[in-house]
Structure formats: C-alpha cells, structure tokens
Image (tube, rainbow, N blue to C red):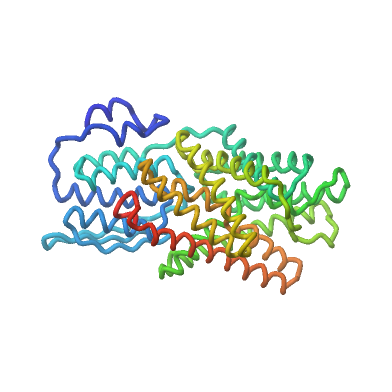
Amino acid sequence: MSASVTAEDPTQSLSLTALYEAPPSQAPTTVEDAVLFISLAARAYAAVDEIPARTEEGLEYLARRLGFTADCTATATAIFITLAKEGRRWTEVIRVHASSPDLTRAVALHRVLERVARNEITPRDAAERLTTLLAWRSKSSIVLDTLASALLSASAALLLRADLTELGLVALLGALVGAVLHLVAGRESLVPLATVLLAAIASGAAFGFDRLNIADIRPVPVLVASLVILLPGWRLTVSMSELAQGHWTAGSGRFLAGVVTLLLLIVGVVVGQQAVASDVKARLILPAATNLPAWVRILSPLVAGLAMTHLFNARRKDALWITLICVITSLAAFGGGKWLGSNAGAFVGAFTATAASILLARRLRLPYAVLQQPATVLLVPGTIGFLSFGSLVDQNVNRAIQTGFMMLMVALTLSIGALLARVALRQGMAREFER
C-alpha cells in the first residue's frame, strides 16, 4: 500500500479518510488477490452490520466486475460464497457475529469498493485497505455514550408529552442504559443479562415513583422512553423486509432475535414491578399522545438524530445530514398519518426516509443506509411489540394479539415503503451494486 496510508495508522486514528483517499498502489494483482479482496469485502459487510440482501448484491456485483461467477448466500449469522473463474473454484464460509451499526466504517467501505468498481485501485490494493478497515475501531467514550443515550430517551419522552419531572427521570435512566451498554460492549454473553437488569431498574424506578407518589409520574411512558435504545424495532422491520423478499433464513432468524429481546425486556419489567410491590392494577398501556406542539415534532427528531449520529458511530461531518433526514422523515410520517391513517403514515415515512437518503447520498458519495437507517429507526414498531408482550403478562390476550398484529403491520408497511423507494429510484443509486 502507498506510503500515505501506512504513515498514519488508521487503527488509532479518529478518521478513515486516509484509508480510502490514498493514492493507488502499483503492485500487480493475481487471481488469488482478487479472491482475497472479495472475501475481505464480505467480512467488511458483516462488520458494518449490512443487511444480508445488500451484502449478496454487493459481493456478486464485485465478483462480476473482476471476471468471476459467484454464488452468495448471506444470513444474519453467516455468509456463504463460491467464486469460479477459468475452471477454478473457491468457497468460503464466513461467520457473522452480531454487531451494532458502524456508519463510519460503512462510509470507508463504500469509498474503497467504489474505487475498485471504477478501476482506480487494484483488488490487491483494496484488500490491504480492507484489512486495515477491519482492524480499525473508533475511540469509545463512556461520557459520550451516556449522553447520547440520555438524549435519545429524552427525545422519545418529548413525543410522549413528558413533563419536566418525567423528562429528568427518563434522561437519568437513559444515561444509565447508555453507560451499562458501553461497559458490556464486545461481551455478547452479557448483553441478555444487561437487558433484563436495565429493564428491571427502569421498571422499578418508574413504578416505584408512581407507587410512592413522589411525583406525578406516568410509569409506562417513562419506562418506554428510558428503554427505547433497547427496543428491537429496527431488527423487526428489517426481518419483515427480508421475509417479504424471500430471504427466509435471515428474516426468520432476525425476527426471532427481536422477539427474544422483547421477552427479556418484559422479564425485567416484571421483576422491577415486583421489587417495588407495584399495584397489581398497573398495566403496560401507553396513553395516547395527540396534538403535540409543532416544536416538539421538530425538536424530538433533531435531538434523536444527533444522538444516533454518535450511537451508530457516524462521522461528525454527516451529523447535519442525518439530523435533516430524521426531521423530514418525522414530519412526513406525521403528515401521512394525519391525513391517511397510522399505517399510511409509516409507509410515507419509510418511503420519504429512503428516497431522500438515496438522493442526498448520491450527491455526498455515501451509502444511503448511513442516512436512511437513523431516520427509519424513528418509525419502527418496537414500542408496539413491547406493549404486546406486556399485555400477555397482564393476561389480556385480546390486547396482546391486537398490538402484536399491529406491530407486524407497521413493520411490513415500513419495509414496503422502503422497498418501493428503492425501486422507484433504482437508477439514482450511488453505485450499481446498491440497486
């Protein structure tokens, strides 16, 4: 690789700009180098938490560009890829470990693959860059993680019409959630335990304040807002999209993972309620929040966009665009829901988030998911699923079925809206293998 890349170790840098903008290497490339590059590209897709369908499309496109025929199957847990060229075949199985979105590395991956597709760098050069990319980690900060989680919870509380007392409690609990998630990051075996523990603490605080009449606290809105970062709404929405497109293994696995997360949260909530001897009449029913002031509908997604810029490890220079798409999406979903109904609002929001992200990403030379994913997270039905399982705990089967069906409908509506936007703007994608 060129000296301009090796002079600065990107694994210790806060920026990957030098990695993908460095001049090309003049070293010759062999067939084995091309195979290694495609294999590393698959690992990089998994590292940035890319959706399996896009992973398959990207790898098959790269293989064709390099003269290979490729068969690729990507799931939530593994990538299977077979390459063939001139009578030779290469097969690799890559284990995919659950990871959180890493939008900074997603941008770097996009730029490297873009340069390969344009024949600006060789596969051998790209393989060296991807090796560095896979080793790179951003410098984590427990202070920033805590603050971002608190802001995200506060933004959700605003939409639930929280007063100052509730807002303060939600921000405090959200900060605790962020701190604990920071401490267990990279320790997958501790995540389920942390999920139950955090749900129990939030439940105990919310229902405890209500039981002791310490303040005028509405337990369920406080509980939902403080745990918003743990709700698997994005995972459920992606699973519906994968199932709708025939990716049965990836979709069903992701869906079941989301359901298990909801169950863990409900277990924690029940433990918290029992710990404070909460009134048995307390029910997990979220009061309707209607007639929100216009400033709330703008401030809430704005704050959420800033929080998710950090939580999704996006570049700081992209914060403005992420926040802008979040605000536009929120307003579009509100307008669609007001005039066409709640499900139509979800559809309009998802279509707007995806379409606006595609158009803006093309101009900014970004993968559109960098802008689309944070905006779509604002619409996902994790709260509905949470309340559905809560109704089962309350032995209210009819309500559980109703809210569970609503969760599936919203998730499917979101996936259809995003899919339609991709089809409508297929020719506007930043790269051919994003289509």
x and y, in percent, of residue 142 in the image: 57, 34
Identity of the residue drawn at 69% across and 62% down: 387
Observer-nearest of 400 and 275: 400
Observer-nearest of 297 and 63: 297
Above or below, 273 relative to 256? above
Is residue 263 at least partly visible in the picture?
no
Whether residue 317 sits left or right of residue 392 in the image: it is left
Identity of the residue drawn at 33% across and 49% down: 430
Whether residue 249 sits left or right of residue 217 in the image: it is left
Above or below, 152 relative to 409? above
Identity of the residue drawn at 72% across and 73% down: 397
The quarter of the rendered structure image containing the C terminus is bottom left
The quarter of the rendered structure image containing the N terminus is top left
The extreme right residue here reads 213
Whether residue 60 sits left or right of residue 44 in the image: it is left
Observer-nearest of 21 and 144: 21
Residue 8 occupies which quadrant of the picture? top left
x and y, in percent, of residue 117 in the image: 23, 48
